[in-house]
Amino acid sequence: MRLRYIKIDNSRNIRVTDFTKFSIEYWRRLSPRERKGIPADLAFLEIMGVIKGSVSQATDFEPLSREQYLGRRLRLANFASERDRDAVYDIYEWYERARKKRGDSDQADRVIKVMKALEAFRSSGVPEDGEFERKIRSLLNEIYVDG
């Protein structure tokens, strides 16, 4: 029996950005003109839940592009007007540049890394990897659905 392990590099991206950190360390750095009247809590929710939260194997684990986001149906986006969604996407792009420059990570980044690792296991063709992948998906469903 061959054992395989995922090597996780914990030396990078150990600073996790949650809403509190976002509002204090990021949002306050934006000028009112750059905020464009968008509330911090809704901007963060839209970034995490819609723009970054729409990643999947079908999108090659990439967040929505501006065009994809602006084309979203209203039920998937929290902002009705295209102008507001465009402003949120500007904020998202600024946040991503600032976050990467600081070496921070957020919960969406962590979930994306797990999803990529699971996809690698699933596509490996090794039966033990498939069983491991099923157990991890079950655990993630319990955490994110029931939690």
Image: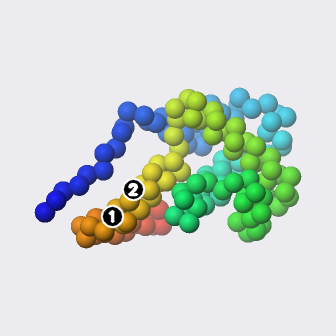
Residue that badge 2 annotates: 117
| Sequence order check, earlier mark of 2 and 1 | 2
Which corner quadrant holds the N terminus?
bottom left
Determine the residue positioned at 73% across, 42% down: 91
Q: Kindly indicate whether the residue at mark 1 contacts the one at mark 2 (C-beta within 8 angstroms).
A: no
Which element type, helix, strand or loop, lies under badge 2? helix
- The amino acid marked with disc number 2 is Ala
- Residue 2: x and y in percent read 16, 59
Question: What residue is disc 1 on?
Answer: 124
Binning the other alpha carbons within 10 Å of mark 1 as few (below 14), some (14 to 19) or many (20 upward) gives few
Location of residue 75 with respect to 55 vertically, above or below: below
Kindly report which numbered mark, 2 or 1, lies closer to the viewer in this rendering: 1
- Secondary structure of the residue carrying tag 1 is loop
Residue at x 80%, y 36% (from the top left corner): 34
Q: Position of residue 95 (x, y in %)?
A: 66, 39
Placement of 144 over or under 38, stated as above or below? below
Could you tell me if residue 139 is visible in this image?
no
Q: Which disc, if any, is residue 27? A: none
Is residue 94 found left or right of 12 in the rendered image?
right
Q: In whole angstroms, how far apart are the C-alphas of marks 2 and 1?
A: 11 Å
Task: Give the residue at x 83% y 43%.
Answer: 37
On screen, residue 45 above or below 54: above
Depth check: give the residue in front, 55 or 29.
Answer: 55
What residue appears at the point 45 percent right and 51 percent down from the top-left corner? 113
Q: Does the rendering let one see residue 103? A: yes
Q: How many marks?
A: 2
The disc labelled 1 sits on which kind of residue? Ser
Q: Nearer the viewer, residue 57 or 76?
A: 57
Q: Choose between 104 and 116: the one closer to the eye.
A: 116
Q: Residues within 10 Å of mark 2 (few under 14, many from 20)?
A: few
Point out residue 6 in the picture as x, y percentages from the top left corner. Answer: 30, 50
Residue lying farthest to the left in this orientation: 1
